[in-house]
Structure formats: C-alpha cells, structure tokens
Amino acid sequence: MPTLPAEYNTLLNHFQPIFSKRVWKLAIVLLVGAILSPWKRTVAAALRIMGLSQVEHFQNYHRVLNRSIWSNLALSAVILYLLLNTFLSYGKVMIRIDETIERRRGKKIKAKGIYRDPVRSSKSHFVKANGLRWISMMLLVNIPCAKEIWGLPFLTVLAPSERYYESKPRGHKKLTDWAHQMGMQVRRWLPKRKIVIVADSSYAALELLDSLLTLPNPVYMVTQLRLDAALFEPAPEKAPHKIGRPPVKGKRLPKLSEVLTDEKTVWQKVTVSNWYGQGSTQVEITSDTATWYSPGKPVVPIRWILVRDPKGKFETKAFLCTDQSAEPVQILKWFIRRWQVEVTFQEVRAPLGVETQRQWSDKAIARTTLILLGLFSWVTLLARQSQKDGKLPIRQASWYAKQLPTFSDAIALVRSRIWHHWGFCMSPLEPDIQNSRTDLLIRLFEAVCYSS
C-alpha cells in the first residue's frame, strides 16, 4: 500500500470504514493511480503509474469496481461532510443539480441511450449523443484561493433512458423522480441545515417542487419558470358552514408575458456579475409572490422573478424560488452560480479523464464515473491541505497571463506533493534522505514518454 503525506492520510482515513481491509489496500492504489495518471482512467493506467504493471494478480484491482462490496452512498456522505467541514461549516447549503452525458458505445453497455447533446446542440441545430446519462449534485462553495464559486460533486446517479426499462420489471424513473430521491437523501444527511437546490427548467415540475417543499424541514428549489405559467393568488379561507372542499387557489393573476408588456409594471435596475458568461451586466427585474397551479397537480407557493435586458441583448427570463421570503436579487445570484457546473463537467473530462474508462460490467460502470466525478472534490480538498498562505501556485507562460488558479493547478499541486513525498521523504528508520529509487524514475519516465 503506497504511503501518502500525513495531511492526506488524515482525510483519507475517513473512508476506511467503508471498505474491508483487503479491499481498502487495493482501493488506495487505484485512487492514487487515478490522480497521478496522465493517461486514460483505466485500471491498467492506474497500475502502470503506480509501478505495478508486472503485478501477478492484477484482476484483484478490477474486482474493487466490479465485485467488491462497498457503498456508493457511504462514499458520497463522507465527501459531503468533508466538503462542508472544510468550506461551509455553517449557513445555508447551496446545491446544483444537473445531468451530463458520458459518450460511450458498445454492445455490453446496457444502460446507454440516445440523448440530446447539450454542448453541441442549439435552438436551430439538434445533435444527438450516444452514451450514459448521469445526474450529479454539486456543492456550490466559494474557493478562497480561486476567488470564485466552484461546483464540487458529491452525489451522482446513473439515469438510464426509458428504453432501458422496457425489459425490466421496474418502471422507468424520470429526471424529476431521481431529483426527488437525491433531495430526500441530502435532507437525511443534513437534517438541520437550510438546503437550496438550483436547477434548470427540466426540474420545474410541480410534483417535484411540492414533494421537497412539504417535508418537515423543507428543501427549497430555484429554477426557471415559463412565461405562460398559470399563477394565482393564495387560496382564501373557506367560509363557515359552506359545503364542499376548501379552495386550493385564489384569483387568477396575469401571466408573466402580460406583466412584461404592462406599462404599470415597476422595474428595478440591478447589476449582476458574470451574467451568462458576459461579465457584469445591468438588468431590470420585477418580482412578486404567487401560487403556481395546474389541474390535477399540487399547488406550490413561489416567488417569481422576471428579468429583462434594457438593451435587448438577451431574451427575457423568468425564475422561481419556493422560498417566498428570499430576496429577488439573491435568488438571481443563486441561479447564476449554476454555470460553474459546466466548468466542472469540462474539468472532469480533461484532467480527470471521464469518458476514457473502458469498464463493461454494469457494476463497474455504475461506480467508475461517479468516483471520477467525486475525485474532482477530493483533489480540491487535498489541494486545500497543501496550499501555502492560502494560495495555489499558478502555471504561467509568456503568452498566457493567468490571473486565478483553476482545477488543473489544484491537481498539479497534489501530484507534485505526492511525487515529492515518495522521492524526498525522510526514511522512517534512518534520519537520512533516501536516494531516488530506480522504480520511481522509471514511473516518471513512463509518465512523460507515454503521456498520449
């Protein structure tokens, strides 16, 4: 089992109770190998970078993913607690939920489907992607050294298409069903913290909003709202001695599309930083509370926010928040944070090699991608332990003046700390510096010469 710096072992020990002693030794090798490997994130690549390319029983490392008994949820809970203790020990918990497509092909990959490619598609051009759909929950926290919000994944589930369930005894679960279960799970983990989930329009479903809002300790959601949504005043109290069920809604309110064109609407000018990647932008907003209702569905009290651009550079957008006491400007800032998730998905594809693994076993597929997504958060935690004076070293070049560190700088710091610990650490038996070992040099040469 490889040795790691003391500050890394402190965090790593939190995961040990989840595994048996035998599996734990193998899992650490795969974990460190996944961090150090510049190649594809396969088990073979992890073994090569760890100097185990000639190990006799290499299949034991594959069994950590496709056979060994350990809980994905237990890993997610530990990562969430570590993230909160490190970056957000008090206050409300901001969570972003979104899905991403892992582009995979192969007859043995049973859960794959055909989905809309969110990266390559546009309003006028539809592109399909063949692969696996994952729903990920990410903790939105302010990283002090980066001076911005990062989305740190902690809970990810595989959400197959409806076609996958045609031959299964279990029925198909929609995105909103997965989101409901994930929201309930986070509430069980954090029974006393205020939780706000930020989502896109795919999760603007009355059943989902109501199921989370009616919990004993509600989970609030912020998402987009249609301009033609049916909004009403709160239901009046039932008159005494009146026969029939109590009313569920009050008087019908104008649609947001009508509020937009009404000359009596009062607009407030606010400046929003990083508005859809356009930097600081001045917008006009108006807001109010209402009840969102559709026949046959639950009634949900919301605060709606209508946003328009006085210069006409973008389309008018509407948002809702199930926490009616929240300030409109704050809700707008919460929703803008969702764009940090797109950065996370890009980073796990580039430095962490998502979509390069080649597992075909159903159990290994269900574990590998969520581990690589969680590795983004794990590396961020390790980099926080290694940084000096609250700063991360930034890779600079004469042609690129980089102002703030990114995830590539974080994983580079963690890698250098591990290599330095192996090559220059003090001997546990003698107070002398160990000479560079031949096997360590061979691994470094392989990492450079076979990096493609």
Image (tube, rainbow, N blue to C red):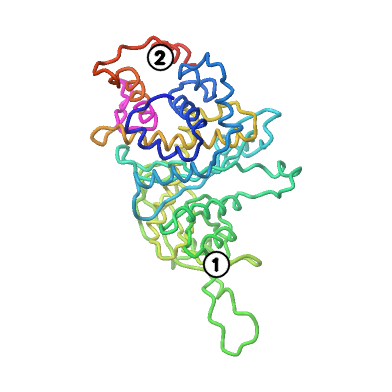
**SS under mark 2:** helix
The image shows residue 97 at horizontal and vertical percentages of 50, 47
The stretch in magenta equals 392-413
The reply, left or right, for residue 33 in relation to residue 211 is left
Residue closer to the observer: 118 or 372:
372
**SS under mark 1:** strand
The image shows residue 388 at horizontal and vertical percentages of 25, 32
Residue closer to the observer: 315 or 248:
248
Q: Residue at point 43% right, 23% down?
A: 36
On residue 34, which mark appears?
A: none
On residue 231, which mark appears?
A: 1
For label 2, the residue is 444
Amino acid type assigned to the residue bearing label 2 in the image: Leu
Note whether 132 is above or below 400 in the view shown. below
Q: Is residue 399 magenta-colored?
A: yes
Amino acid type assigned to the residue bearing label 1 in the image: Leu
Q: Residue at point 55% right, 67% down?
A: 231
Question: What's the CA distance linking mark 2 and mark 1?
Answer: 63 Å
Q: Is residue 360 magenta-colored?
A: no
Q: Residue at point 30% right, 32% down?
A: 386
Q: Earlier in the sequence, mark 2 or mark 1?
A: 1
The image shows residue 49 at horizontal and vertical percentages of 46, 18
Tell us which disc is closer to us: 2 or 1: 2
